[in-house]
Amino acid sequence: MFWIPPVLLLIYSGLFGAMVGSFCNVAIYRIPRRCRSVSRPLRSFCPGCMQTIAWYDNLPVLSWLALRARCRNCKMPISIRYPLVEALVAGLWVLIAWRTAWLDPQPLPRMLCLQILASILVVVSLIDIDWKIIPDRIDLPGIVLAPVVACLVPGFVEPLQSAGTLLGVSHPAVLRLLGSLAGAATGAGSLYLVAVIGAWAFKREAMGMGDVKLMGMLGGLLGWQPVLLAIAGACFLGTFFGLALKLTRKTSLMPFGPHLCAASFWLMLFGDETWAFLLRAWDARQQDPLGFNLGALAVCLVLLLILWIMRRRPE
């Protein structure tokens, strides 16, 4: 098998990640504006003067610093988000390379898939923050491709042995495919159930269909058990950041998609450690049930207080 020195792989990941981050900025700007195509025009342009940006003014992070955050032609300010997105995607690519290539002796297919997925999730999260939508142009192809990736690339979904026994199949790729389909159904079905119950209980939309389809895609890469943990983690993140917004901006309204992306991606990278931590917590409960139950009760009371604070409409 072709071997790449780990240090060189990290450097390449950072450089290519920064370039992909530059493309992510294009996608974040153009995809919600349906009159624009991601590929046409092929070159980036300034939204102020509409002039095509020269290649030397489009270098990730460096050009923003060299131009002092202003367009060369019209002097329109360039948002700091552009270099931050490029740096974020580059950092994620390096983290994934370190996690899957440095620590795993057979990482490359899964590493590349995770790096592409990380870039997509950054785009999804920022579009959801800006526009409160998750475009079908992203999640519908993802729902179709997720089982294919899980089937062909080991390391995403655990093979679903029970379904294989029931159907009389034993090939690992087929078992991974079954696990992926079960994960997609569990992820999308869980959030769809929340949407239906929330709409009935609160007489308004409680969960967007974009979140449902997004979780169908991510569930196809996680499997049916981890996807439930991802949804729980997203709820925790949503509560935490919702409280922070309530205290700082007097509102708790925020999209749920970024939390789903963050929790799911965390489990794809650190799922084993997360499960081990939860098992240790369960063992602690078995050894000291009183202390564990009191701690759990305290956490529940704090969460109830947070929800009570958040339930009030902003002034």
Image: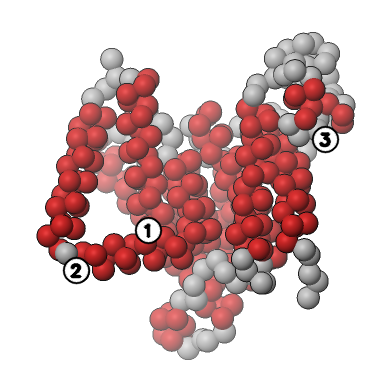
Q: What residue type is labelled 1?
A: Leu
Quadrant in which the N terminus is drawn: bottom right
Q: What residue type is labelled 3?
A: Leu
In this figure, which residue is indicated by the disc labeled 1?
228
Do the CB atoms of the residues marked 2 and 1 lie less than 8 Å apart?
no
In this figure, which residue is indicated by the disc labeled 2?
287
Which residue is rendered at x = 26% and y = 22% of the image? 313
- Relative placement, left or right, of 261 versus 244 is right
SS state under label 1: helix
Q: What percent of the width, then of the height, locates residue 85?
A: 64, 35
- Relative placement, left or right, of 202 versus 253 is left
Asked whether 193 or 237 is in front, the reply is 237
Q: What percent of the width, then of the height, locates residue 137?
A: 61, 44
Asked whether 22 or 101 is in front, the reply is 101
Q: What percent of the width, then of the height, locates residue 314?
A: 29, 19
In this figure, which residue is indicated by the disc labeled 3?
42
Instruction: Kindly indicate the quadrant of the structure image that contains residue 86.
Output: top right
Tag 1 or tag 2, which sits nearer the N-term?
1
Q: What percent of the width, then of the height, locates residue 65?
A: 75, 24
Q: What residue type is labelled 2?
A: Gln
